[in-house]
Image: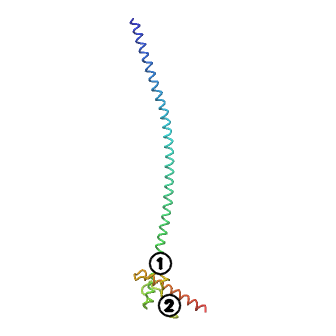
């Protein structure tokens, strides 16, 4: 009887072991299924990382190209800006000289300063500057900029008329 009890106990323990093995088998299968999913996820993650690395390298190359291009364009723009500033200064100097000549011609005074134009002896006295009609020029206000512009315009017209007369007298 003790032998039967021991055998019965061994059978129960064996059945329990088989049941526990079945539970462990199910857990291992789920773990392996999860492992396969994890492997796929890791492979996808590695592929995405490699693609991102290539994209970052490409973006760095594009940024370097843009930096070089923008730098070159900026240098060219600075050169053009300096050139334009020089031309504007030259234009201001010319306008200043012409306005001094006009003021001198109107006032009958000798031009003063190194920027004054050299006087040549005219063969005929220059005529007075022509009057500018409201249709030909914008309205001349009493402020300095418009009166200077009008004076410069009148001087330029007088200069052009004198040059035409000289050409006509040389042609005749």
**At 46% across and 25% down in the image, what residue appears?**
26
Residue 168 image point, x, y percent: 58, 90
Q: Residues within 10 Å of mark 2 (few under 14, many from 20)?
A: few
- Label 1 secondary element: helix
How many badges with numbers are in the image?
2
Q: Is residue 128 left or right of residue 168?
A: left
Q: Residues within 10 Å of mark 1 (few under 14, many from 20)?
A: few
Nearer to us in this view, 19 or 60: 19
| Residue 16 location, quadrant | top left
Q: Quadrant of the N terminus?
A: top left
**At 45% across and 82% down in the image, what residue appears?**
139
Residue 132 image point, x, y percent: 48, 86
Nearer to us in this view, 73 or 104: 104
| Residue projecting furthest to the front | 135
Residue 93 image point, x, y percent: 45, 79
Mark 2 and mark 1: Cα distance apart in space? 23 Å
Numbered disc in front, either 2 or 1? 1
The dot on residue 4 is none
Q: Which residue is mark 2?
A: 120
Residue 89 image point, x, y percent: 45, 76
| Residue projecting furthest to the bottom | 124
Question: Which mark sits nearer the N-terminus, 2 or 1?
Answer: 1
Q: Which residue is mark 1?
A: 91
**At 42% across and 85% down in the image, what residue appears?**
113
70 in relation to 21, above or below: below
Nearer to us in this view, 18 or 60: 18
99 in relation to 9, above or below: below
- Label 2 secondary element: loop
Q: Are marks 2 and 1 in contact (CB under 8 Å)?
A: no
83 in relation to 30, above or below: below
Q: Quadrant of the C terminus?
A: bottom right
């Amino acid at each position: 009887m003790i032998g039967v009890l021991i055998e019965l106990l061994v059978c129960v323990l064996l059945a329990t072991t088989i049941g526990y093995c079945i539970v462990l088998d199910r857990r291992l299968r789920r773990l392996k299924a999860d492992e396969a999913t994890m492997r796929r996820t890791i492979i996808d993650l590695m592929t995405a990382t490699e693609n991102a690395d290539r994209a970052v390298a490409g973006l760095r190359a594009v940024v370097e190209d843009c930096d070089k291009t923008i730098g070159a364009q900026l240098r060219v723009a600075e050169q053009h800006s300096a050139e334009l500033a020089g031309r504007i200064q030259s234009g201001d100097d010319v306008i200043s000289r012409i306005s001094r000549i006009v003021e001198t011609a109107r006032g009958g005074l000798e031009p003063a300063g190194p920027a004054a134009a050299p006087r040549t002896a005219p063969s005929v006295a220059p005529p007075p500057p022509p009057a500018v009609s409201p249709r030909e020029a914008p309205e001349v206000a009493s402020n300095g900029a418009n009166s200077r512009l009008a004076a410069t315009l009148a001087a330029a017209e007088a200069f052009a008329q004198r040059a035409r007369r000289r050409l006509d007298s040389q042609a005749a």
